Structures are given as structure tokens and as C-alpha cells.
Image (cartoon, rainbow, N blue to C red):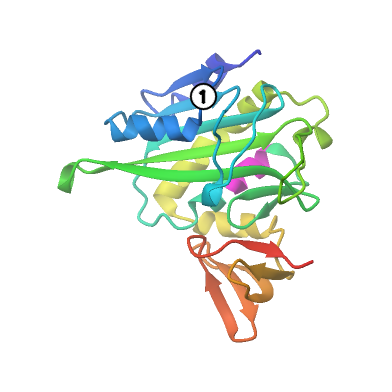
Amino acid sequence: MNWPAEAVWEGVSPLLPGFTVEILPEIDSSNTELMRRARAGRMEPVLLVAEQQTAGRGRLGRGWRSGAGDSLTFSLGLPLAPADWSGLSLAVGVSLAESLHPRIQLKWPNDLWLADRKLAGILIETASSGEGREARRYAVIGVGINIAAPQATGLSTAPAWVREVLPEAQAGETLLRIAVPLVQAVQAFEALGFAPFQARFDARDALRDRAVILSDGTQGTAHGISEGGALLVHTAAGMSTVTSSEVSVRPAA
């Protein structure tokens, strides 16, 4: 497969000194690998692309399937020190959606949707090294995007794929399209928090004004997101502020 690793490096390295790009034919999970490295003290900025993952992971422990060429799976690892981590996955989603296509929407907290079907998922993990003033936090931002039509058997949400809106799309070209804006978005989030992304998320919010069911069974109507990136849901008990660590959410049938 033809990967534009040098072009990605040329675009990103001025933003992230010491940045490298790695392409691996197969790995258990790009997120798992970068978390292993971070725990061993390796916290340099890197973009790790896996042509195929044997144990890809999504949010809440769900699996993510990836076949060579049919999907784009990668993890961006970099030291990060925002004042507030709330909303990082939403900011990442905003950047990806804006880079890909106007029709792509965002399903809180970490999915990209096309016509109410899942196009991509985001998984963010962090590792710490050192203590006190020497403490460093490393963010691993994992992204999985369907490029071609995936095998849908057993999936809880019907899949969508990039070629529905960009028929000639390839994994490498898609990576080149999204890499620099993604790094710029993460750095903007680190400096300014979620505030600059709120209106941009609202413009693509797939759940707004829809009936939703939370994973604890609570039903209500989604009313957008707060300044910190929490989901606002109007329930029988009033307005609830839902954080992604507490529940998952899906539209009501």
C-alpha cells in the first residue's frame, strides 16, 4: 500500500519538533502499542499507522475491525498539558469531520456519522510519567475510519464508509488530508480548551433535538453540549449534564 509518510512528516514536523511517522503492516492495536511505549518512558510525538489491527479497541472496550486498505487506523501520540481535558474527543471529531466532508456529522462523544451510520470512532487514552514538577502526561489519540464498505455482521450500529461521499478515497490519501489539521486542532485545544470548538460541533451535532436513551435506561431529548463538552439531555427529572465517562447514548428508535 502506498502511504504518504514523508508528506505527512513534512506537514506535521514544523508543528511538533521530533515528530516521526511509522507504518506497520500489522499490530494488535496502535493505541495499545503507544501506551506501552509511554509507560516505558517513550513520550516523543509520533503518528503510528496500522495497516491491519488484530485487537483494535473502541470506547468502553468494544472491538474495532480493520482490514488492510478497507480502513484507516492510526494513533497520534504526543505530550499534552491542557488546563482541562474535557471535550478533547469532541475537538478531535470536529477536526476529522471538517477535513473529510460537509455531510459528516458528529455523534457525541466520539463517533463520526454519515446518514445515522457509524463512519469512524475515536479513542483517547493518557499515560503519565514522573512525579511532581517532572510529571508529564502523554495523550494517545486513536482513530479508526472506514474507507470501504466493512463487514457489518455483529455491529451494534450500521456502518458507513468514506467512499460513499468520496468515491476515489484511499487510506493514504485520507491520512494526508486529515493529519495536519488534526495536530493543529489538538494544539488549539491544549492552548484554548474546548470553547473554540463548541459552535463547530453544534453545526454537525447528530443528536441535537432528538430523543435519546442513555445506557442506564434514562430517556430524554438531546439539547446540544455544554461549554465543557458534556451532553445536555432534557429528561423527566429536568436537564441532565452527561459526561462521557458515565454513560453511552443512542438515538431512540
**Amino acid identity at mark 1:** Ile
Q: Is residue 175 above or below residue 204?
A: above
Kindly identify which residue carries mark 1. 27
Q: Position of residue 67 (x, y in %)?
A: 67, 26
Which residue is depicted at the point 61% across and 33% down? 178
User: Does residue 144 appear to the left or right of 127 in the view shown?
Assistant: right
Q: Position of residue 192 (x, y in %)?
A: 43, 53
Range drawn in magenta: 93-99
Please identify the dominant SS of the magenta region: helix
Q: Residue at x 52, y 18 (%)?
A: 24
Query: In this rendering, would 222 be left or right of 61?
Result: right
At 46% from the left edge and 49% from the top edge, which residue is drawn? 189
Queried whether the magenta region covers residue 56, the answer comes back as: no
Q: Is the N terminus in the top left, top right, bottom left or bottom right quadrant?
A: top right
- Up-down relation of residue 21 to residue 125 (above or below): above
Res. 57 image quadrant? top right
Residue that extends furthest to the front in the rendered view of this protein? 154
Of residue 55 and residue 38, the one placed in the foreground of this image is: 55
Between 164 and 196, which is closer to the camera in this rendering?
164
Q: Picture coordinates of residue 155 (x, y %)?
A: 71, 46
Say which of 15 and 179 sits in front.
179
Q: Considering depth in this image, is 153 or 118 the residue closer to the camera?
A: 153
Q: The C terminus lies in which quarter of the figure?
A: bottom right
Q: Circle 1 — which element?
A: loop
